Image (cartoon, rainbow, N blue to C red):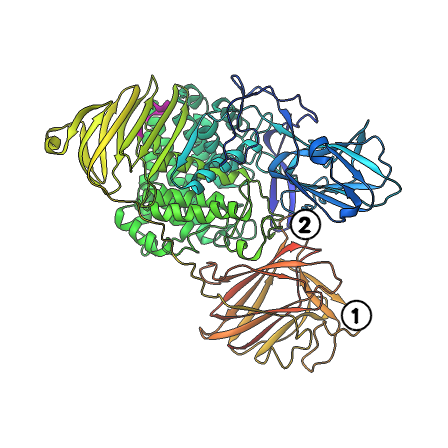
Amino acid sequence: MIYFARVFFTVAFLMLCQSFGQYVLAQNSIYPPITATKRGALNPLSPDPIFNYSWDNPKASDGLESYNLKPLSWTTSAPGSFDMKEFKQNDVIVVNGIGAIRFDFGQTNAGWLEFESEDLIDSITMSISEYNEPSIVNSGAVHPVKTLKPVKHGQTYRLELNPELYEGVRFGWINVLSHQRAWHIKNLRLVCQVKPVNYKGSFSCSDPELTKIWYTGAYNVKLNLQKDYFGAILMERSDRHSWTGDAYPSQAASMVAFGNYDFVKANIVNTADLNNGIFSYSLYWVLSLVDYINYTGDVEFAQKYIDNASKKLDLAFQHYGQSPKLGFFGWDERLGAGFENPNTAESQRAYSMLSIRSWIEFGSLMNQIGRVDLAKKYTDYALQKIDEQRKRKNWLNEFGLHASADAINTGFTTAKENEVFYNSNYTDRVSRLSYSPFNQYFIIGAMAKMQKYNDAISSIKDCWGGQIKYGGTTFFEVYRPSWNSILEQNDAPPNNQCGYTSLTHPWSSGVVKWLSEEMLGIKPLAPGFKEFEIIPHLGDTISFVSGSTPTLQGIISANFNLKTGLTKLTIPKGTKAKRLAIPLGGSTVKSLYLNGKLIWNVKASSSSKTIQIKNGYLNVSDLLPGKYEYKVVYDKVKEPKASNDLPWNYPVNTFKQDSLTSGKWRDSYGKDGFMLFNQLGNGKHLQKLPAYISSVTLRNEANVHLEVSANNSVLSDSLNANQNLGAIVTKDPNPTQQTITMDIEAKDDQLHQVALYFLDWNNKERRSAVEVFDAKTLNLIAPVQLIKNYQKGKYLVFNYKGSIRIRVNHVRGENAAVSGVFFDQDN
């Protein structure tokens, strides 16, 4: 047993390991074939290639198993070098020359690439990736470049990139580097590992995109189920273990989709004494414990961990108002951009609200299991701090998107307070999205508590649906919808403050639980679903929803159809539906039938004690175990509305890329001022700032100054004479150093032009992504821009107002490089 966790230290910008007491059990290298049985058909809305396989009674103690996949499609860099005629039918490729074959397996998988050959004599390498180029990651990984000479085992050639073998693989390559004579590739395959688990939960609605999101999130979690713990990332970049906070939405989604409660329980035990050096992660562990007890009713387990949870909650009480060093709160710029500046005022406010929520939810749990003393203690904690918060002037306007979401999720905010939060933070389609789907989970949770279901559904489609539109078959560590405008399907994504971006990050799967609890509406009210409610929230656009939630008592299923008026339910023994709310979608109702018998009509509605119309629902109370089929007869039917999304409002939305001016900038740019990075020497910038700019502050940059011969691409000086090369670059391949920030502090709010100059001076095939933020709010104010093919120099030009932050992110190549910034009046 190895007990460790990985903590990022922003001061040194290095990923280091410290002992915090976590189980991390290495996987075996080879696993037995799956013992599951094929039942039924594949689900076209699920990316899982073995969706229709199920195990008999899978348990947490089961080991990993394996299955093989063949590629769905392939392309070759040199068609004459590869004879593919027999590949589809007989799994044979004849190699006749130098080149590469790229295989697409159709979805991301947890596996390794291998093939057989009896006559291989050429020099070859193999590659894998989650996107359509061979993958690269940060230093610290066993093999940061996911391309390597295969290891030979008899006649099998296997790509072995780490001791556990598996990586995130959507695409695989065989690269033939030299050729002597024809030879054969046989039985090329992806060997995939899997933890035995069955889809016990389900979800479907009239919007197939939302259905696909549910199943993609479930598959995202399934890929990261390791033998003894919940993994937190599929690719091996040196942080692949169970992060306590990451596990919170992962475990929540897993319980809803798979009902693998024993495995969730094991992971809660494994992470009980671990917070990864991040204070909020201790509170997410408490919320995970509450979730688990609510879903299972395992009160005995809760009692074993009361002291552990109490210590975490008491520490949060000590922290309240003291601005502790949080370590991390999220990758979003407004939360300090991960490890760069995690102790921002917004992060501190969010942590305070998360503390209140944790006290309230744990206090509620203690009340339900008979620990009235602890229920009072933590409820009092919450009420005391709520009262203190309300005494602070202007506190509502101080809270940004993330802090307000955590405040709303406490359940203590009033309708008037929610209205202030909503108008400040949730009405703009761009700014209501967090950079990380992990944090977006809490934001859509807040939207649900505010009854803003149309906004929540819209943002779900923007965040999670956008990832699928990109080509994703799993969900990412970070994502911006505007990536889809600058990237082709499955292109390499921007890397940034999170380092090399993971495209399979299970912390992004919280939306699975949201869809089941909020849209389908099945939610526990007492531990173990002894009492629960079914209140579907369809917004204005959804006409039907159906699905199921697994409990230890059996499966709860529900099906609501606004068009037909049919509602079907299954309530297992040992549970009771305290409230059923049949959605009416704005239609008016004449009568209600149960199993073919009239049980209510509008004329007798006032005398009914168990059936009431309220807030757009027919409400039925206290349903005992059994199967129910309700039929609503409408008087007037209201059709669901068509989707009507808000526009993408970017204050900065017009950009120009200039690849003609090159290094001779004097007559084209910089008439008001300029800053030429490292032109006078390492760390010595040549600058003349305009009167309206007070400062340009750089962060995270490495400096480059090179003596070079005359080159028109190199920036000339202010007299238009050639100079030596200067640039600021990202600190690739150091972990979390794939980004540079440039804060431009303005003295006015007038419109001005800025031009950034990019030069790939040594032809390293650099690609960079540029983000622009309002320096005061740190809201994103422009769609992400992609700069590529800048070997001869390229300017990115745009107009802006006020102070801004520019973030330059690495995409591909040696690093991201910027040589200068130029200021002019608006054009």
Image quarter for residue 270? top right
Q: Which badge, 2 or 1, is on the more N-terminal residue?
A: 1
The crowd level at tag 2 (other Cα within 10 Å; few <14, some 14-19, many 20+) is: some
User: Would you say residue 303 sits in the magenta stretch?
Assistant: no
Q: Where is residue 395 in the image (x, y as percent from the top left)?
A: 34, 54
* Point 68% across, 73% down: residue: 662
> What residue occupies the far right of the structure in this picture?
180
- Three-letter amino acid code at the position of disc 2: Asn
Q: Describe residue 272's horizontal placement relative to residue 295 as left or right.
A: right
Residue that label 2 marks: 734
Q: Where is residue 753 in the image (x, y as percent from the top left)?
A: 53, 74
Q: Describe residue 325's horizontal placement relative to residue 128 as left or right.
A: left
Q: Is mark 2 on a helix, strand or loop?
A: loop
Say if 551 sits above or below 720 in the image.
above
Whether residue 224 can be seen here: no
* Point 43% across, 45% down: residue: 460
Q: Position of residue 158 (x, y in %)?
A: 75, 33
Q: Say whether marks 2 and 1 touch (CB < 8 Å).
A: no
Q: Between 476 and 376, which is closer to the camera in this rendering? A: 476
Q: Between 709 and 399, which is closer to the camera in this rendering? A: 709
User: Would you say residue 529 sits in the magenta stretch?
Assistant: yes
Q: What element carries label 1?
A: loop
Whether residue 411 can be seen here: yes
Residue that label 1 marks: 708
- The span shown in magenta is 526-533
Q: Position of residue 320 (x, y in %)?
A: 41, 44
Image quarter for residue 100? top right
The crowd level at tag 1 (other Cα within 10 Å; few <14, some 14-19, many 20+) is: few
- Three-letter amino acid code at the position of disc 1: Val
Image quarter for residue 795? bottom right
